[in-house]
Image (tube, helix red, strand yellow):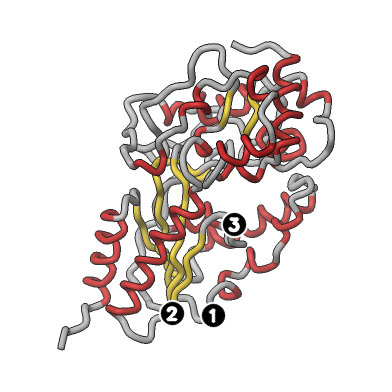
Amino acid sequence: MKRPLAVDGLAEALRLRAEALGFAPVGIAAVPGSPRLTLRTAALERWLGAGHQADMAWMNDPRRRRIEALLPGVRSVLAVGWNYHVAAQRRPGSLRVARYGWGRDYHRVIDSRLRQLGRWLAQEAPGTTWRACVDSAPLLDKAWAEEAGLGWIGKNGNLIHRQRGSWMLLGHLLTSLPLPPDRPAEALCGTCTACMEACPTGAIDEPFVVDARRCIAYHTIENRDRDLPAPIRDQLQGWVAGCDICQEVCPWNRPPLACSSDPDVQPRDWLLDLRGPEALAWSDAEWDERLRASALRRIRPWMWRRNLRAALAGEWG
């Protein structure tokens, strides 16, 4: 009969298994967390009160303030990063699509790998309960990742790692097992305001506060109106699905950065050479085929056409 691992050994083994599944960085936070979690929750309340969520009503899910509502008896959170920075580049003159959408749907990939970790943990520590969460779950995911030492929440709202920058997606494994926590990350944005100055629509009008009502990413992905608002439409700069401007200008994202070789994040060729006139002619069935197993399926074909027309009406380089 296999002897169960001690808690410290189990935490290290869990970390190594997460890394073997392609996650890095990996960290652990203890529930209920440090006083900073209380501050992050209060910041969420202020953000919601100001209406910065626009039509994203799910951001007001009360479970987002109470991690225990997601997993009763939760004691620890394993936070993982999944690097989606790749060596490929967009072809000159092509329309722009946010990097997170270049490969396979990260929700499926991260969730599947976290579930493997959860099943392994339950085998090693019988009676342990767990839950896998990606960003579709009502969890303060960036705050818990910060608490686990994966990085700090920058002025553009993204989690930033000292060596890996912000080109990473997050996943969390909640567990009832009390694991030794890592030290929370130290904030290192300093006096830099590059992201705030670069946003063409002024969506980051104060540090650490992103107003979705003025965000290109929100409007090209979530806005279900027939037409984009004029202030957004006039500043698209070629973006038709998401926006990476505030990440592209971040000093922590300057090369050299590690590029992922994971096949699930490698880009589809057409996303790197997206030509508006050609794409506008695609049928709904063609869109469906091209976006199979993609996080960008959230953008309906008619929304793609709306975004394409708006981007083509402007100028970009």
Instruction: Rate crowding at label 2 as few (under 14), some (14 to 19) or many (20 or more) other CA atoms within 10 Å.
Output: some
- Asked if 165 appears above or below 51 in the picture, the reply is above
Q: Where is residue 152? Give x, y as percent.
A: 47, 45
- Asked if 206 appears above or below 117 in the picture, the reply is above
Instruction: Give the residue at x 27% y 76%.
Output: 7
Disc with the residue nearer the chain's start (2 vs 3): 2
Q: Is residue 205 visible?
A: no
* 11 displayed left or right of 292: left
Instruction: Give the residue at x 16% y 84%.
Output: 2
- Asked if 311 appears above or below 211 in the picture, the reply is above
Looking at the rendered structure, the kind of residue marked 2 is Thr
Depth check: give the residue in front, 34 or 199: 199
Instruction: Choose top left, top right, bottom left or bottom right for residue 66.
Output: bottom right
- Asked if 48 appears above or below 204 in the picture, the reply is below
Residue hosting label 2: 129
Instruction: Give the residue at x 52% y 57%.
Output: 134
Q: Which mark is residue 30?
A: none
* 101 displayed left or right of 20: right
Residue hosting label 3: 136
Q: Are marks 1 and 2 in contact (CB under 8 Å)?
A: yes
In which quadrant is the N terminus drawn?
bottom left
Residue hosting label 1: 72
Looking at the rendered structure, the kind of residue marked 1 is Pro
